[in-house]
Image (spheres, rainbow, N blue to C red):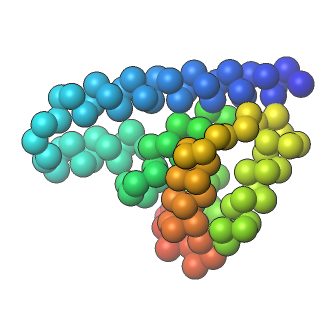
Amino acid sequence: MRIAKFCKAATTLTYMIILILAASHQVGTASASNAADEEEEDFNGILVNKPGADITFAYCAGCHSERIIAQQGLTRDGWIEVLEWMAEDQGMGEIEDPDYTDIINYLSDHYGEDRPNFPS
């Protein structure tokens, strides 16, 4: 039970920090460059740098490594089941929309059964 409370608090804190960092990052990057792209990739760990990566990292990396995400190859329904299991059995807080939909879309698109982004 203590771990579940810790994960909820860690997830919330991580999400807040990432939002603050993302906002300050956007303010300082009026012109796009390769260095900014590399920085964004590092910001989300090994997650594919596509729309939804930041919110997925913010919610998930508070309790486990993003490598756990990248190792999976699930259908859309499989990702929904995993998030339900984490909320019901593992103490993860509920994720509200639009964040929930963005996360499911991101995971389905980039970490599906064909595992196009399996880490090497």
The location of residue 49, given as percent across then percent down, is 38, 54
Residue at image coords 79%, 45%: 86
The quadrant of the picture occupied by the N terminus is: top right
Q: Residue furthest left?
A: 31
Q: Position of residue 105 (x, y in %)?
A: 54, 61
Q: Position of residue 25 (x, y in %)?
A: 27, 31
Q: Against 36, is 119 above or below?
A: below
- Taking the spot 83% from the left edge, 39% from the top edge, the residue there is 90
- Count the marks: 0
Task: Return the residue found at the far bottom.
Answer: 114
The x and y percentages for residue 79 are 69, 61
Question: Position of 24 compared to 93: left or right?
Answer: left
The residue lying toward the viewer, choosing from 22 and 45, is 22
Which residue is pictured at 81% across the width and 28% down the height?
4
Q: In the figure, 82 relative to 76: above or below?
A: above
Determine if residue 56 is in view: yes
Corner quadrant of residue 9: top right
Residue 60 visible somewhere in the drawing: no
User: Which quarter of the figure has residue 5?
Assistant: top right
Q: Quadrant of residue 48?
A: bottom left
Residue at point 59%, 38% (across, down): 59
* 30 horizontally vs 95: left or right: left
For the residue pair 38 and 16, the one nearer the viewer reads as: 16
